[in-house]
Image (cartoon, rainbow, N blue to C red):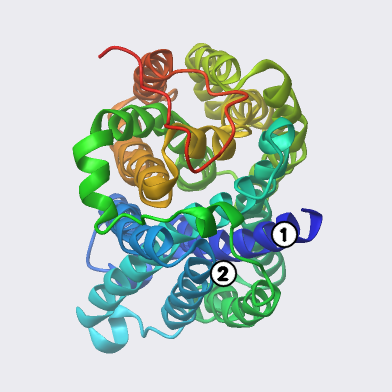
Amino acid sequence: MLRLAAASLVGTAIEFYDFFVYGTAAALVLGPLFFPTFSPLAGTLAAFGTFGIGFIARPLGSVLFGHIGDRRGRRPVLVASLMLTGAATVAVGCVPTFGTIGMAAPVLLLVLRFLQGLGLGGEWGGAVLLTAEHAPDGRRALWSSFPQVGPSLGFLLANGVMLGLSATLSDAQFASWGWRIPFWGAGVLALAGLWLRGSLAESPLFLEIDDHARVPLAEVVRGHWRLVLLTAGALAVGYAVFYTMTTWSLAYATERLGVSRTVMLACVMATVVVQGALTPLLAVLGDRCGRRPLCLTGCAATALWMFPMVALLSTGEPPLMLLGFLGAMLALVTMFAVIAAYLPELYEPRVRCTGAAVGYNLGGVLGGALTPIVATALAEQGGRVPWGVGAYLTAVALLSLGCFALLPETRPVPVTVTEPAPAPGPI
C-alpha cells in the first residue's frame, strides 16, 4: 500500500504541477504577452478565460479516460493521462507570443490548455481508484488521501519555481523567457512519473468484475445522474475557494493593492503547505467518524469564513492575508481530505471510474472555471474591500452544503464488486 500510495501521490503531484503552473502564469504574465491589445483588466480576464478552458475539458477527459478505466483497467489511465498532460504543458512553454505570430498565439494557448484539462480529467479518477480499491476498508480514507496530497505538492512545486524565478530575474527577463522554464520542466517530471507508474499492479477489484460496462457514460447518465449532479454541486465550493486564493488573489493583490508578486506567492504557498500536512490527519478522522460529517462541517465553516477572508485580503498586509487564507484552507481541507474515499464509495464498481471522475470534474467546472473571471469582475465593481467576492463564495458554499446534506454516509461500506452503491438522499 505504501508503494502504491506513494506512486499515486507523485504522479498526481506531477499532473497538478502542469495544471497549476498555467494558473499562476495566467495571473502574472499571460495577459500582456498573449492579449496585448486589451486593457489590463480585459487582458487579465482573457488570460483567466484560457485558464477556464482547462476546467471545461476536465469532464470530457473524465468521460474519455473513465471509459478506458471502466473497460480496460485503472492502470492504463494513469499512464495515458500523464503523457498527454506533460506533452501539452511542455508545448505551452514553446508557444510564441502575440507579438511574434499574432492571433495564432492565443489560439494555440487555448488548444494546449484544453489538452491539459483533458489529461487531468482522467488522472484523478485513475489515481484515486487504484489506491482506494487496494486499501483495507478501515483505512480507506487514509490511503486514498495520498493522491489528494498530490495537488498540494504540485502547487508548491509550480509556485516554488515561479517564486524562485520571480525573485532572481528582473521583470523584463521574467516576461521575456523566465515564465517558460516551469513549463519546460514538466517534460522531465512526466518522464519521472511514467517510470514510477510503470510497475503498479492493476486494481484487484477491477479484475474481479465479470461484466464490464459496455458504455460506462450511458450507464452513469441513466442510473446515476442525480448522484453525479449532487457530487458536482458538493465539490464546487472547494474549487471556488481554492482558485480564489491561489489564482485570483495573485492578480488582485499585485494589480490593485500593490503587493509584490514574491510576497503573494509566499503567502499562498504557506497556505498550501498547511493543506498538504493536514490532509492525511483529517483523513484518519474520516475513517473514524465518517465522510459526511467532515464534509458538512468543512462546508459550513467555509460559508462563515468567506467575508472575513476577503476583508483580511483587502488589507494588503501579508500577516493578515495569510490568516485569511489559513482559515479558508482549514475549512477546505476538512472536506477534501475524505473526498477520495467518499466518491468511489458512492458509485458501483462497473462505472466507478467514469461516475466518480465526472462528478469530481464537473465540480471543477462549477467552482473553478468561472471563479477567477467572476471574482475579477466583482472586485472591479466594488471599493477597497471586494464584498461581492465574499458574497459569491458564500453562495457557492451554501449550494455545496445543501448537496452534501442530500448525500448519504458511506463508511464503512466495502468497495466490493457485488455490493451496490448507496442511494443518494431525496431530491
The amino acid pointed to by label 1 is Leu
Q: Is mark 2 on a helix, strand or loop?
A: helix
Name the residue nearer the viewer: 171 or 219: 219
Name the residue nearer the viewer: 255 or 148: 148
Q: Residue at point 47% right, 15% down? A: 303
Label 2 vs label 1: CA separation? 42 Å
Above or below, 174 against 2 in this view is below
Residue carrying label 1: 4
Residue carrying label 2: 171
- Within 10 Å of the Cα at label 1, are there few (<14), some (14-19), or many (20+) other Cα atoms? many
Q: In which quarter of the image is residue 103?
A: bottom left
Residue 194 shown left or right of residue 175 in the figure: right
Whether residue 15 can be seen here: yes
Q: Is mark 1 on a helix, strand or loop?
A: helix
Q: In which quarter of the image is residue 309?
A: top right
Q: Residue at point 45% right, 18% down? A: 408
Name the residue nearer the viewer: 372 or 52: 52
Q: Residue at point 36% right, 21% down? A: 424
Whether residue 357 can be seen here: no
Nearest to viewer (mark 2 / mark 1): 1
In percent of width and height, residue 145 lies at 67, 42
The extreme front residue here reads 210
The amino acid pointed to by label 2 is Asp
In percent of width and height, residue 105 lies at 28, 79
- Within 10 Å of the Cα at label 2, are there few (<14), some (14-19), or many (20+) other Cα atoms? few
In percent of width and height, residue 220 lies at 27, 43
